Image (cartoon, grey):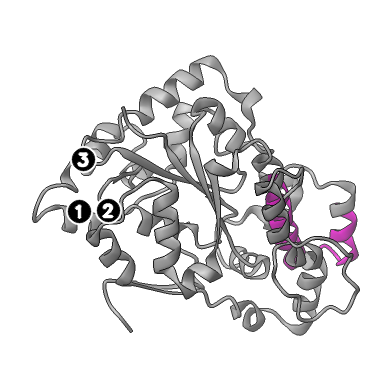
Amino acid sequence: MNPSPLFIVGVGRSGSSVFHRLMCRHPRAAWLSRVLEHWPNAAPINRVVMHALALPGVGHSVSRMIDPGECYEYWEQLAPGFARACRDLVAADVQNDVLAQVRRALAQVPTKRRPQLVAKVTGWPRIGFLREIFPNAKFIHVVRDGRAVAASLLKVDWWQGWRGPSGWLFGELTAEHMAEWHRHDRSFVALAGIQWKILMDAMERARQSVPTSCMVEIEYEDLCRDPLSHFRRVAEFAELEWVPEFERAIRSAELRSENEKWRRYFTPSQQSILESVLRSHLVRYGYEPQMTREPVEAGATHMQMIDETEHGAATAVSDLPPPDVAVMVGRKS
């Protein structure tokens, strides 16, 4: 029997694609390839790719030519609405036929040599939905500074925030968020920051039903500083043996978060707007606001809340690679 799936989740533009691609370099990992992004019906070809990865003299070339992907059109065929829902998908959204289809389809991805399915979804967490289908699934949450995420969102051509909240996939703004947006003259910088808060809050709610043994959180900035130790931690969490081939892949990848690019992208006024919008959430997640001067409400930091959760206290914790993340695989600059 194949191990339970391993899902990488997080807000888009958080470095999760880089993490996903490196995680899939483990020789026991199976994944959805970009073949399925272009041809959602090509599941048999994806399986051929997984088999080819294990062939001497061929696998290395295949892994360099074909990357892992999120493959939302493929997911849409299995679970309509998976990529287009206006709110997070939860356990109650799983229909009987969808449960059977997803289990049957994803069971065809792993192979004998690559039994561990590693998949990535970003945006809404969808953790409750996925746990209803795969009760023993494990999750890796990749977190990144919301200022860097907001700056990156404004640089991609597919960001739907330009249409305003009525035209994006994150539902209507709450009265509080709507007032905040209007307070900043409907700034798109503010709206990108609000999107990060919406999705991080959704993650807080989603993780409440997940045992601590089934979820781990990785801060992308820490990953860039020390990738080897963080991937060791993740491999242990996923019950994947630490092997020389995987270590070589991690050592050959040079990661630089380059989070400070948001300051170069934004004017002082825009920087001030963004930090005003994000301030409480930045503090919660251990990121230091640098411009605003308002007092921060007293309370536990995000890491303190995680510690309390692990000790049984009741708490609430709230992609192509981002263009502002430099990644060189197999070479040093």
Percent from the top left, x then y, of residue 147? 67, 70
Q: Predominant secondary structure in magenta?
A: helix
Please check the rendered image and state whether residue 265 is part of the magenta-colored stretch, yes or no: no
Q: Of the residues tagged 3 and 1, which is closer to the observer?
A: 3
User: Residue under circle 3?
Assistant: 113
> Residues under labels 3 and 1: Cα distance?
16 Å
Labels 1 and 2 touching (C-beta < 8 A): yes
Q: How many marks?
A: 3
Residues in magenta? Answer: 178-202
User: Residue under circle 1?
Assistant: 62
Task: Report the side of 9 relative to 176 (left or right).
Answer: left
Of the image marks 3 and 1, the number of the one nearer the N terminus:
1
Percent from the top left, x then y, of residue 178? 86, 53
Q: Secondary structure at mark 2?
A: loop
Q: Residue at x 44, y 57 (%)?
A: 233
Q: Of the residues tagged 3 and 2, which is closer to the observer?
A: 3
User: Residue under circle 2?
Assistant: 66
Judged from this view, the residue extending furthest toward the left is 57
Q: Secondary structure at mark 3?
A: loop
Percent from the top left, x then y, of residue 308? 72, 51
Residue density around tag 3, few if under 14, some if 14–19, many if 20 or more, within 10 Å: some
